[in-house]
Image: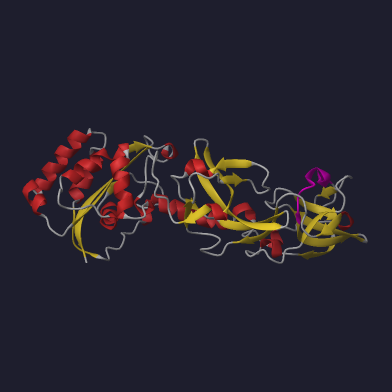
Amino acid sequence: MQTKFKAALAGVAAALGAFGLSTVSANALVTPTVFKHVTQDGTFFANEYTKVTPYHLKSTKKSVYMWNDMHSKKLYNLKHYSSYTWYQLATGYKGKSKYVQVSNFPMTKRGWVWAGYLSKGYNSKHYQVVSKRYGRPTYAGEYFHVANPNKNAYLWDWSHTKIRANLKDYTNQSFYKRHSVRMAHDGKQTWYSYVDVKTKKGTVSGYVASSLLASGKTTNHANTDVVYPNDFTSTTDYLEYIKDSNYQKLTRSIMALFPNTPVDLGMSKIAANNYGDWTPLDGDDDYEPMSTSGYKGIVGFNQVSKYLYDNRNASNDTKIAGVKKLLDEAGYTQAKRDSLSGYKLGVYNINNIKLSYLNDQTPDGKMAWYGLAIGKAE
């Protein structure tokens, strides 16, 4: 079960169209209009975003109106957005007057402006987006975490005028980079990464200076209810989580049943994904077992996983008693478990935990996932 990862992959596709900047065709931008001799400019939508034509107001003291396609309605007075850079989408004429169809960066404001009010070039005020990239892994894709947990890592809106979150408060999360922008300010240019962070108020998205992120997933799992198998970076990381988490008491008890079989992250992923039982969520229909490459002699205790899932509401004492009974029946008595040699233990449990983001996906808003197996490393 890779629900979290499937959701993340789905998010990647959505990320490539964040703000509608890469997936909306230029043809969709110019609707029937009174403007003549219209020339469309699709460079604003190109992933690399390098040949875009930027504009800023010649004067911020007088009213400059943005018009709709029919030049029948004033949409915005641009003097109220004096720090914006406007990006060219098309050019056209109304009579002998040249107009430019422009948009702000997130495309929340788009329309036609008389060219005489505009000067080419980026606005010299505040922060301006001068480049955008989707190339992986440098600018998009891959996981990152806060590089320095003691240093502020502010998540800004696109205009760099509002702080949406301080990632220093979320060092237990890994952030998937959706795209990157280069912002110019006071003669300097800095790369920012667009990421999502889960807060008590929901998911918040924004831009954080790329230099404040470190490559790879976080190893800080403090105050985290659930960490999925692929979110661990190593066996050491996984063992620290098992030791510290209040939700891993069942796992610790199962480990005690195999005193001479060390827990292994790779084997635990196999146990969870190939021999586990879990709460079905959207996207599980196309699940495919993960590779067992690197391991041999695998014994999956499917009956244990099923028992734990079927009795997920039972106490841990009841669950452990049932696990012992099933292991004995499978021939893995305590004596045999004590004598196991050369095996690695694969164990993974989400012990019927209530998760707010599952309220509309499961009847009780809880997640249960149990997996147990042993195998030898090749």
**Residue 193 x %, y %:** 57, 54
Whether the magenta-drawn stretch holds residue 156 is answered as: no
Q: Report the residue that reaches farthest toward the front.
A: 150
Q: Quadrant of residue 122?
A: bottom right
**Residue 67 x %, y %:** 82, 49
Comparing 88 with 257, the one in front is 257
Which corner quadrant holds the C terminus? bottom left
Image position of 299 (left or right of 181): left
**Residue visible at 68% across and 48% down?**
159
- Residue 350 can be seen in this image: no
**Residue visible at 24% across and 43% down?**
251
Comparing 79 with 246, the one in front is 246
- Residue 301 can be seen in this image: yes
**Residue 243 x %, y %:** 28, 42
Image position of 295 (left or right of 67): left
Residue range of the region highlighted in magenta in the rendering = 73-86
Comparing 213 with 95, the one in front is 213
Q: Is residue 175 above or below residue 97?
A: above
Whether the magenta-drawn stretch holds residue 76 is answered as: yes
Q: Quadrant of residue 15?
A: bottom right
Image position of 331 (left or right of 17): left
Picture mark count: 0
**Residue visible at 31% across and 46% down?**
240
